[in-house]
Amino acid sequence: MKAHCIFLGVLLFAPLAALHAANKPQGKPNIILILADDLGYGDLRCYGSEINNTPHIDALAKRGLRFTDFHSAGAMCSPTRASILTGRYPQRFGRMFDGALSGTTQRHLGLPLQATTIAEVLRRNGYPTACFG
């Protein structure tokens, strides 16, 4: 009788254990942030473009997250990049982020070294990070 109860218990609880194991994430998700200058919302096929063929980005979008409601923190590239990298309004870094920074006359300017970026937070949480361009 005791073996019968153990067998019945295993039979009843095995599916629950399998369901519990199936719901556990299999590691950390991959995060890829693609930023392109002068790329409009409708310039990619995955967002409705009928002109541009973007199969690789479309494949990433199909298997990942697509953001469909977003707002820019600044009208120029430098403030927008500062906001994306830090999660803060670019104005928090001073007036120099009211517009674009020049790569020739303002090379000494940029994010303060004490600003925490998304890459630093991800690295502290076990992600390898890189920037390509």
Image: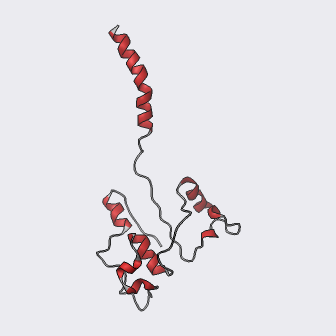
23 sits left or right of 124 in the view: right
Q: Position of residue 57 (x, y in %)?
A: 58, 62
- Tell me if 63 is positioned left or right of 52 in this view: left
Which residue: 44% across, 79% down? Answer: 79
Question: Measured from the top left, where is residue 127 in percent x and y?
Answer: 36, 58
- Looking at the picture, does residue 19 appear above or below residue 40? above
The quarter of the picture where the N terminus appears is: top left
Q: Name the residue: 32% across, 79% down.
A: 112
Up-down relation of residue 2 to residue 102 (above or below): above
Residue in the picture at 50% in, 67% down: 34
**Extreme residue in the bottom direction:** 105
- Expressed as whole percent of the image width and height from the top left, the position of residue 72 reads 50, 74
Residue 82 lies, in percent from the top left, at 41, 76
Q: Quadrant of residue 97?
A: bottom left
Q: In front: 75, or 124? A: 75
Question: What residue is drawn where x is 35% and y is 16%?
Answer: 6
Horizontally, residue 45 falls left or right of residue 81, namely: right
